[in-house]
Image: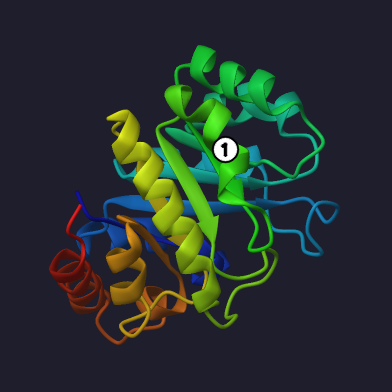
Amino acid sequence: MIKISPSVLASDFSALGAESIRMEKSGADYLHLDVMDGRFVPNITFGAPVIKSIRNKTSLVFDVHLMIDEPLKYIEDFKKAGADIITFHAESSSPVGETVDKIVESGCKAGISIKPNTAAEVVFPYLDKLSMVLVMTVEPGFGGQSFMPETMEKIKTLRAEINRRGLDIDIQVDGGINEKTVEPAASAGANVFVAGSAVFGADDASAAISTLRSLAEKSFSF
């Protein structure tokens, strides 16, 4: 199933509650929440308290992307804050298998993210426990970057392995997703699309989400 997950990184941070409500009314499936610590990536955004503060504003699935150095230490914090999906980076300093187990034990769905230069095969040992794999289509840390088409090969590799094993796992893409890039990503096998400025910056967020969904549905054939 195609899902659209608007990234609050592109929202009006002074009105996160209202922005969350706006995304739900506009037809979003998830709300993508980028947590950055200034260590794993060269940017700082927000943490669990901010997520908790908007949890009661919307029933959208909270798709929490931890771009932090030691995610294992904070799984419980983000679970308590209202996360539904917790995705962390394979390149972080926390043990990957232990972190996946901690997320699953917390009651959240587990996801692993990989940077553009990380091989898809890194996540293969953990696929049986995952609900999602996030392939970064830009270098993580800042919004508004250009889509990297070379990352599509990794999506194809992941989708082939997921299908080979008969697993039900989403492949999410994040970075430079818009009307031009959503189709090649869907054609490669992605089905969850993080869009920042393409949605939050649109004159009509509902129309933007609808267009992205329609384009992805036409291209996704897995």
Whether residue 210 sits left or right of residue 140 in the image: it is: left
Given residues 189 and 113, the one toward you in this image is 189
Question: 91 or 27, which is in the foreground?
Answer: 91
Q: Residue at x 45, y 78 (%)?
A: 197
Question: Front-most of 198 and 200?
Answer: 198
Quadrant hosting residue 138:
bottom right
Seen at 35% across and 43% down, the residue is 170
Q: Residue at x 52, y 56 (%)?
A: 135
* Residue 71 place in picture, x, y as percent: 72, 34
| One can see residue 156 in this view | yes
- Residue on which disc 1 sits: 123
The x, y position of residue 110, in whole percent, is 49, 30
Q: Is residue 67 above or below residue 181?
A: above
Hey, which quadrant is residue 20 in on the image? bottom left
Q: Quadrant of residue 92?
A: top right
Residue 6 left/right relative to 1 = right
Left or right, residue 23 beside residue 153: left
Residue furthest right as drawn: 39
Q: Give the side of residue 189 with respect to residue 76, left or right.
A: left
Residue 57 visible to the viewer: no
Relative to the observer, which residue lies in front, 207 or 150? Answer: 150
In the displayed structure, 83 sits above or below 1; it is: above
Report the colour scheme.
rainbow
- Where is residue 141? Give x, y as percent: 70, 65
Considering the numbered disc 1 on the image, is that residue within a helix, a strand or a loop?
helix
Label 1 crowd (10 A; few <14 / some 14-19 / many >=20): many
With respect to residue 165, does 120 lie above or below? below
Question: How many numbered discs?
Answer: 1
Q: Amino acid at mark 1?
A: Val
The image shows residue 147 at horizontal and vertical percentages of 52, 79
